[in-house]
Image (cartoon, coloured by chain):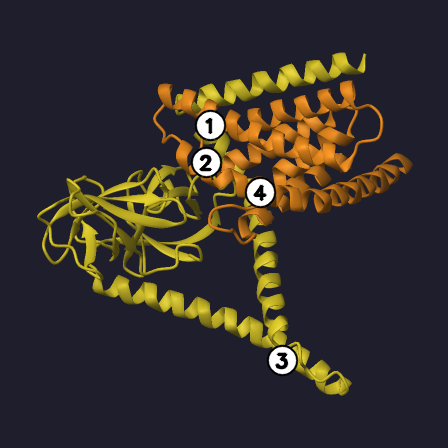
Chain colours: A orange, B yellow
Amino acid sequence: MAKVVIYAITVIFLLALSIVFPKIGTSAPSFLFLLTAVYAFRKDNSDYLWLAFFSGLTLDFYSNTFLGIFALAFLITAFIINYTTRTFFSSDLSLGYIAIIVSLAYLLVVGLVYILNTMAVRFGTALSISGEYLTIKIWLDVFLNLIFVAPIYFFSLSVDRLINYYSKDEGSF
Amino acid sequence: MRSKRQLGVFSLLIFLGLVLLILSINGLSKPIQSTGVQPSRPLVYVFSGIGNSFKSFFSYFSSVGSVNKKNASLSEQLRKLQQENVALQQYRLENEKLRAELDYRQKTTHSLVSATVLGKDPSGFSQSLVLNIGKGAGIKVGAAVLSEGYLIGKIVSVDSFTSKVLLVTDPQSTIDAQISATGDNGIVRGSYGSGMIIENLSQSAVVNKDDRVITAGLSTEIPKGLLIGNVGQLQSQKSDLLQRATVISGVDLKNLEFVSVIKE
């Protein structure tokens, strides 16, 4: 229970941070994506999948896209990160590897969001995302994500420490 | 064993995501969206408030870095005063914005509903806002949203207690407009970098810098005569078939706190 509550507060906190964080043009670090990516690197169990899904869904609630688009994009990306890391890089992860994967994964998220939204627009009544706008925006996003991946990594460690602390308390009752 | 469980969870969540997407495409996801936003709204509001306070706090302290550290009691007093000052500055800014909004409301003949901006699109994939009013306040899709008398966007979705605004600077936003001084019609479109462009102006149209750009009222939802902004730079050449120019809004679209929505 403590785990669910702490994860929920973490996701909402990072959502609020994304809202108030100053943007450069329209670019900003995607904190919820970074949290998803970091947990996909670190976790062996299915926690990272739930976290990816609900991080994306939270973003869906506050975004101007179809519901489920970010949830699906985050989920698929997290699964791919975890799968590739566990399959090909079971030993120590290098900083370079993390930087490359975070950058590629973000491009994958953007691609998935664009494709899913374009497909959904064909069947529903909503606005499509401008591809031209995305291509200008994403490169600065990637750069900002790389700057913030380390802070989010240490933040995730603190979140896990907090979960362990409260889980022990729950166990003792 | 573990990977089988992961695959199971993955498949379940993919299925759930697809169901949500299909519901959303068919316009049936409003209750879920509304239910999802409501519990997180107070926390987002609190965290956003803390974030904004930190921004003000640190920006203020960076400008008074040369405070005399030798006098501890004075520094303490100063710190308290600074904190009070930051709060007062916030109140003053809030007050000025509310006054500007109220001033316009008294002049206009439109029926307006006040709203507080709850948040911006955190994904950055589109430029939109979430407002704290919805169907309950009589808000409808397509309604014009104003700030200090300037058109800042239109409502694109409404649920019971919140609504979403697509800003005029979003690349997907198009508004029928005209140059106030000459009555020449064009289309105002959002462009990258939080700007706007008026295009499709005929070559014979006379467009000057600082000319007022207003809504043309060709669509049913957005009434005629709402101020969008002023003409900035002409971007077209004499040889072009149609003219285009940048449009500068009179309000800072990145720092909106209070807005008004036209109700009728």
Query: Are discs 1 and 3 both within one chain?
Result: no
Image quadrant occupied by the C terminus of chain A? top right
Q: Which chain letter matches label 2?
A: A
Q: Which mark is residue A114?
A: 1
Q: Nearer the viewer, residue A29 or B23?
A: A29
As measured in the structure, the alpha-carbon distance from the residue carrying label 2 to the one carrying label 1 is: 9 Å
Who's the residue at 42% across and 48% down the image? Answer: B131
As drawn, B105 above or below A27: below
As drawn, B2 above or below B162: above
Q: Which chain letter matches label 4?
A: B
Residue A48, percent across and down?
71, 28
Q: Which chain letter matches label 1?
A: A
Relative side of A102 to A71, left or right: right
- Is disc 3 placed on a helix, strand or loop? helix
Q: Which mark is residue B81?
A: 3
Other-residue count near label 1 (Cα within 10 Å), few / some / many at <14 / 14–19 / ≥20: many
Q: Nearer the viewer, residue B70 or B104?
A: B70
Q: Which residue is mark 2?
A: A134
Other-residue count near label 4 (Cα within 10 Å), few / some / many at <14 / 14–19 / ≥20: some
Q: Nearer the viewer, residue B5 or B61?
A: B61
Who's the residue at 27% across and 62% down the image? Answer: B105
- Is disc 1 placed on a helix, strand or loop? helix
- Camera-nearest label, 2 or 3: 2
* Contact between labelled residues 1 and 2, with CB atoms less than 8 Å apart: yes
Callout 3 amino acid: Leu
Callout 1 amino acid: Tyr
- Is disc 2 placed on a helix, strand or loop? helix
Callout 2 amino acid: Leu
As measured in the structure, the alpha-carbon distance from the residue carrying label 4 to the one carrying label 1 is: 26 Å
Q: Quadrant of residue A72?
A: top right
Query: Are discs 4 and 2 both within one chain?
Result: no
